[in-house]
Amino acid sequence: MRLCRTSLYKTSPCGTSLALPCIVGEWSHWSGCAEQCQPDLRIRRRYVQQEPKNGGEACPALEEKAGCLEYLTYKGEDCGHEHVPAFITTSEYSKERKRRAASSLEPSDKEAAGYCVEFKTESLSHHCALENRPYARWMQYLREGHTVCVACQPPAMNTDTHRCSGDGHNADGSKILHWEAVGNSQCQGTWKKIRQLEHCSCPLVHSFIFT
């Protein structure tokens, strides 16, 4: 069989077509929550720029979902701060919140500085460890007995009290507090407040935000 060079490092039988992999574009920005004032999902997508050919590598996932909670109605009215227990999600969500706030065309007062709360997890449901959906895999890192950091940032921070719901304000270290993961209501548990800090310093896998 005569081989023809198809690239600097590859050859294929002459007369055969070169396998071309799928090529996709960049991820879009995250959407807003599907519903306001209650735990829900946000979505981002990317699109195929080149379909795979001749047995080339298949296309990767074109859609991702993640848990979220919005605190403004579509009319701009404040809502959602009465939720109990604490709703948490991955700290990665804070990057999207900051991007959306920076791109907002609506005038706003200077936002209050956020803060961080350290908790020691006391218990959690087995549903957290079983979670394997791409947007919710962060839940697998929740473990009993671990110290976690949860950041309180706008817009989860109440504009009047400058606090986040479920942050354990005024709770001593013996009080059992409840939390729930946004994106899977069955992933929930309890923790005890250790202390409040100006900035979070936990490893990324143990860093979350109030939503």
Image (cartoon, rainbow, N blue to C red):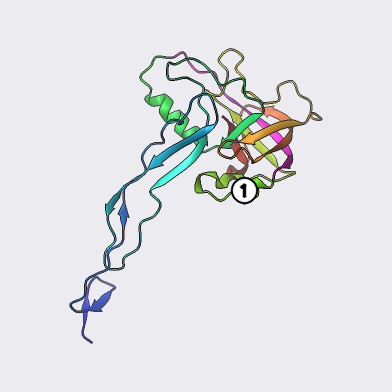
Q: Amino acid at mark 1?
A: Gln
Compared with 13, 132 (above or below) is: above
Q: Position of residue 133 (x, y in %)?
A: 53, 48
Quadrant where the C terminus sits is top right
Please tell me in which quadrant of the rendered image residue 6 appears: bottom left
Magenta segment, which residues? 108-125
Q: Closer to the camera, 172 or 42?
A: 42
Residue 84 image-quadrant placement: top right
- Residue at 55% across / 15% down in the picture? 159
Question: Residue 11, relative to residue 156: is it above or below?
Answer: below
Q: Position of residue 111 (x, y in %)?
A: 50, 18
Residue 190 on image: x %, y %: 73, 36
Residue positioned 68% across, 27% down in the render:
196
Q: Report x, y in % for residue 103.
A: 37, 25
Indicate left or right for 111 with 146 as reference: left
- Alpha-carbon neighbours of circle 1 within 10 Å: few (<14), some, or many (≥20)? some
Left or right of 154? Residue 191 is right
**Residue position for label 1:** 140
Residue positioned most to the left: 15
